[in-house]
Image (spheres, rainbow, N blue to C red):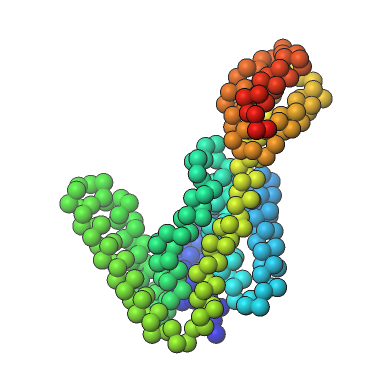
């Protein structure tokens, strides 16, 4: 029994071809090496390791349940790399939407998630997958480039994409019906709910990254409006952390409003007056 589906094998196959093509080009190394160096930066490596550790902890926790099967490790790895990492790293952006963390759960409950589950779980013969994947990529490229030309071209490409998508969905449903007798029900259920459970499990990680990123920006801006005394700066930062704690809302509030009231030659008394004003305006602290 194969661990990877024919669709996953197809994607790996074309990915290897693409990487080999880039490396064989004269400027291939000039493109890949800077990307690798950037990815190995300490500020990216540490968060990435934290995400992986949470995945390992989640996997270890799941092994204590009676339904556990080691084949689920593949699904956990794929979700962590292609969903968990983007979710956590996107949370560190300068501005995230108000209901970002709630939408992480909602997005996994949408019908699109169900369709994605079926189209990813019930796959076709390797030969058909090798033909379908390039067509899918071609349609995506056409949809993102040629649609800007004329309205008629846009409608034509959208129609092709719709036909292609519904065709794959119809074939997938047929494949699912034909295979349902040979697939254990528990595996289907676990595969369906695993992304939702992982999304909930990773919410604290994404939230922590978001708060940490805001604190980093906050302390950077405070540094421009404080004396050069390092001990005093450290004292101010601990005071701000004590006031804002782990509240993303409060850190943003202090960053957007109260940092503006600070100035370079400000005394400690003036700083703590600003902090007291901040605490009064946020009575729940």
Please say whether residue 87 is visible from this viewpoint.
yes
Provide residue 252's location: percent of width, then percent of height: 59, 32
Please say whether residue 226 is visible from this viewpoint.
no
Quarter of the figure with the C terminus: top right
Is residue 45 found left or right of 10 in the rendered image? right
Which residue occupies 67% across, 39% down?
A: 246
Which residue occupies 52% across, 83% down?
A: 184
* Furthest residue in direction left, as rendered: 152
Q: Quadrant of residue 129?
A: bottom left
Image height of 199 relative to 234, above or below:
below
Image height of 1 relative to 136, above or below:
below
Q: Camera-side residue: 218 or 63? A: 63
Is residue 40 found left or right of 178 in the rendered image? right
Q: Camera-side residue: 26 or 80? A: 80
* Furthest residue in direction bottom, as rendered: 181
Provide residue 27's location: percent of width, then percent of height: 49, 51
Image height of 47 relative to 191, above or below:
above
Which residue occupies 53% across, 59% down?
A: 82
Provide residue 64's location: percent of width, then percent of height: 70, 73
Q: Quadrant of residue 202?
A: bottom right
Report the number of numbered marks. 0
Provide residue 170's location: percent of width, then percent of height: 31, 74
């Amino acid at each position: 029994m194969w661990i990877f589906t024919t669709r996953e094998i197809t994607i790996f196959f074309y990915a290897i071809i693409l990487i080999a093509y880039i490396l064989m080009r004269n400027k291939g190394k000039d493109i890949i090496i800077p990307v690798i160096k950037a990815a190995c930066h300490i500020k990216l490596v540490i968060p990435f390791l934290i995400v992986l550790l949470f995945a390992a902890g989640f996997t270890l926790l799941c092994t204590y349940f009676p339904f556990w099967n080691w084949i689920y490790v593949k699904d956990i790895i794929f979700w962590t790399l292609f969903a968990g990492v983007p979710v956590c790293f996107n949370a560190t952006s300068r501005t995230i939407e108000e209901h970002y963390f709630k939408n992480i759960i909602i997005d996994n409950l949408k019908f699109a998630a169900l369709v994605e589950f079926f189209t990813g779980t019930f796959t076709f013969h390797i030969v058909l997958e090798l033909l379908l994947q390039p067509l899918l990529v071609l349609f995506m490229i056409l949809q993102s480039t040629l649609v800007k030309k004329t309205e008629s071209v846009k409608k034509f490409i959208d129609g092709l994409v719709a036909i292609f998508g519904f065709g794959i969905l119809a074939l997938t449903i047929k494949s699912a019906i034909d295979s349902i007798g040979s697939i254990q029900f528990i595996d289907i259920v676990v595969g369906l709910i695993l992304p939702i459970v992982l999304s909930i499990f990773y919410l604290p990680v994404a939230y922590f990254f978001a708060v940490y990123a805001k604190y980093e920006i906050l302390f950077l801006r405070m540094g421009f409006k404080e004396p050069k005394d390092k001990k005093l700066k450290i004292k101010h930062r601990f005071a701000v952390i004590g006031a804002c704690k782990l509240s993303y809302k409060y850190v943003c509030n202090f960053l957007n409003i109260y940092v503006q009231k600070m100035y370079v030659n400000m005394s400690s008394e003036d700083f703590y007056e600003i902090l007291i004003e901040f605490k009064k305006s946020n009575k729940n602290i």
